[in-house]
Structures are given as C-alpha cells and as structure tokens.
Image (cartoon, helix red, strand yellow):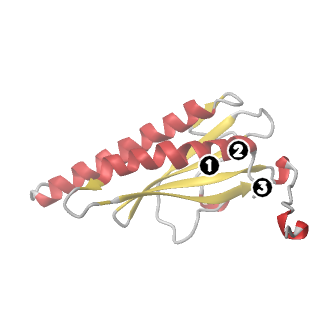
Amino acid sequence: MLNKEKDIKIMIEIESYMYDGANWQAQCVLAYLRCMGIAKVEDLTWDKENRRSEGKLKVGRCENCREQGYVFTIIYGVKQLAHFWVYEHRNSDNLCVVEFEGFFLNTPTINNIPMKDKYDTTKDFSCGDIVNCGNWIIERIEYYLNREKSMTIKKNEGEE
C-alpha cells in the first residue's frame, strides 16, 4: 500500500536553496574551486609513497557588511600559504579577490584582511567572469605551492 505522506517531497524556492549569505558570484567561484581547485592541489601535492595529498584547499565565510563572500586558504602540510577573499563589490558588481598571507586559527575576518577599503583589491573581474576568476586563483595557488615545495627542497638539501 502506498503511503502518500511519506512519498511527498518538499521543494523550496531556488533562491533560498543552500543560501549561506554569500553572493551568487562568490558561490559560483566556490563551486568552481571545489572541483578544479581541489584537483590542482591534489595533483601538485600528491605524495606517491604515502598515497595522499599533502595540500588542502579550505574555505570559510567572510563579510564586510554588504560585501559577502568566502576566504579560500591554501595549506601545504600544516602551513597556511595564502588566502583569497572572493566577493562581489556592491557598488560595481565586479567580482573581486583580495590575496593575502598570514596564519589564522579560524577563518580570517574582515579585520584580518590587509586592505584600506573595499576598493583595495588584488584582482577584479567583470560581473559573471567566474571561470577566469577561478583560474586566476588556481594559478596563484600553483605559485604558492611551487614556491613552498622549492623552499622545502632547499631546506632538505641544507641550503639557505
């Protein structure tokens, strides 16, 4: 016998589905990096001997009143190499990235990000330019990982 109450699937409006307060452009960059960024990090940090990746890409929410987005952090071993705050600029609708370094126990807040104001960005992209933004962040991740790996090799060889 069919129980109609158990077979009903509740649907919600799409604009509130998985909504965490971040802007749609930042959410798109998150989705892009979830696939392409993780694959690049794993490719660059794969330890064949131990059969695991030495790198991680982490994410946390960050906001500055109307600018809502995410901070992506690249980690190699236990070291935080760089952070990228991604948000939509509310005056221009541009997709903005602020790149910075530092160690944080939790997701960096707007007070931790070294910038004068919301116009002080590292890189801007046109509204909707998700793939180019994601690819730029991946290129920067690759830079930081390669830099850290070369420094580790030099330390292991006894170079300064």
Q: Secondary structure at mark 3?
A: loop
On the rendered structure, is 7 left or right of 158?
Answer: right
Q: Which residue is mark 2?
A: 118
Q: Label 2 amino acid? A: Lys
Q: Residue 19 has which mark?
A: 3
Choose top left, top right, bottom left or bottom right for residue 146: top left
Q: Label 3 amino acid? A: Tyr
In percent of width and height, residue 70 lies at 64, 53
On the rendered structure, is 115 left or right of 78?
Answer: right
Q: Residue at x 53, y 45 (%)?
A: 33
Q: Residue at x 70, y 40 (%)?
A: 25
Query: Mark 1: few, some, or many residues within 10 Å (few <14, many ≥20)?
Result: some
User: Considering only vertical position in the picture, is 27 above or below 93?
Assistant: below
Q: Disc 2, disc 3: CB below 8 Å?
A: no
Q: Disc 2, disc 1: CB below 8 Å?
A: yes
Q: Which quarter of the image is occupied by the N terminus?
A: bottom right
Q: Residue 115 has which mark?
A: 1
Q: Nearer the viewer, mark 2 or mark 3?
A: 3
Q: Label 1 amino acid? A: Met
In percent of width and height, residue 89 lies at 74, 39
In percent of width and height, residue 120 lies at 64, 41
In percent of width and height, residue 135 lies at 50, 35
Q: Which comes sooner in the sequence, label 3 or label 1?
A: 3
Q: Nearer the viewer, residue 151 or 73?
A: 73
Q: Which quarter of the image is occupied by the C terminus?
A: bottom left
